[in-house]
Image (tube, helix red, strand yellow):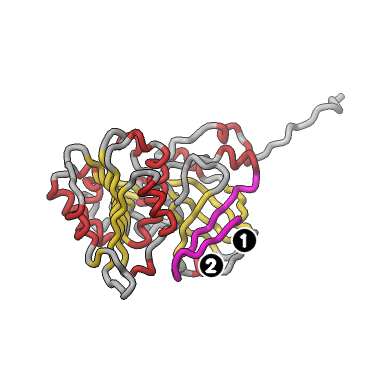
Amino acid sequence: MPDKHFVIPRQDINREDFTSSIPDFNRRSEFLKTDMGYKCIITNIVRLTEQEKLFKLRIIDTLERNIFRFKPGQFLMLELPGYGDVPISISSSNSNHEYIELCIRKAGHVTSALFNLAEGAHVAIRGPFGSAFPMDEMSGHNVLLIAGGLGFAPLRAPLFWINEHRERFLNVNVLYGVKEPSQLLFTYQFDEWEKISHIVLHTIVEHADAGWKGHHGMITDLFKDITIDPETTYAVVCGPPVMFKVVCSYLDKLGIPMNRMFVSLERRMHCGMGKCCRCMVGSTFTCVDGPVFDYWSVMNLKEAI
């Protein structure tokens, strides 16, 4: 006679045992773990420029919020039900588990729909995906962070990391260039980074207006304002691919080894899991093997930039 007290235990696919440990993000076999979906609520939206907004997301489920982890340089797949999903670099501190910040540019179908959302709207995220900046490896060295345009968004996470572990680093310089002053991102944090974090920020614009008091020209013009010791310096470069060749070639001439230059290469990423093959360069998938590469690897990837 069957046991009437036998009950099949409830299975919750969002709370399996693997969620209690931090996965190895660089292994393809870990996709079952990093491809978890997290339901989120938008708690705040800040307009940064005419084309960019900063979205602050909070994972709704408390347990999922506590287990979510990422590393500076990684990205998420942000899904808006009914419209699709897009890969977005994470722009917040990886030590803050209360919310996630994403800097989004209005550029296509999904991002245009996102710009029409208000606080309180629900979205979903998957991830994190991809490789990360080697922050521990950079400890004990000078760090040069170079960003062009929207490339400042993925640099914000390593900036937070450096700020929270400032005693581990020597001199930290940020070189940031945009086409026009109105395109500068996160200007409200500039004073904090310089006065509190002792991070030296250098900005430049290609086309100055009447109210601009800073540098005018190309981002490489900022190098004359800093002293670089190639033996003790790591460089991180984020921005349009055309900038990589110019900036990294300049750094190479200064003597910084290519394996100590890192770029964030978000080349035609779409699915985040190497399935759609849109970001494929030879046998390399930007979304799986990147988006963070050392420049030596990028130099050996035909048509990567």
- Disc 1 residue type (three-letter): Glu
The reply to whether residue 281 is visible in this rendering is no
Instruction: Identify the element where label 2 is drawn.
Output: helix
Residue 246: x percent and y percent? 20, 58
- For the view shown, which residue lies furthest in the bottom direction? 210
Magenta-colored stretch includes residue 201 = no
Disc assigned to residue 115: 2
- Name the one closer to the observer, 241 or 101: 101
Task: Tell me where the magenta segment starts and ends, as one range.
Answer: 42-61
Q: Is residue 91 above or below residue 183?
A: above
- Between 281 and 69, the residue placed more toward the observer is 69
> Mark 1 highlights which residue?
119
- Closest to the observer: 195 or 190? 195
Q: Quadrant of the C terminus?
A: bottom left
Looking at the image, residue 297 lies above or below residue 83: above
Residue at 62% x, 54% y: name it: 41
Frontmost residue, 149 versus 287: 149
Residue 47, horizontal then vertical, whole percent: 50, 65
Q: Residues within 10 Å of mark 2 (few under 14, many from 20)?
A: some
Q: CA separation, marks 1 and 2?
A: 11 Å
- Label 1 SS: loop
- Determine the main secondary structure of the stretch shown in magenta: strand
| Image location (x, y in percent) of residue 20 | 57, 32
Q: Amino acid at mark 2?
A: Phe
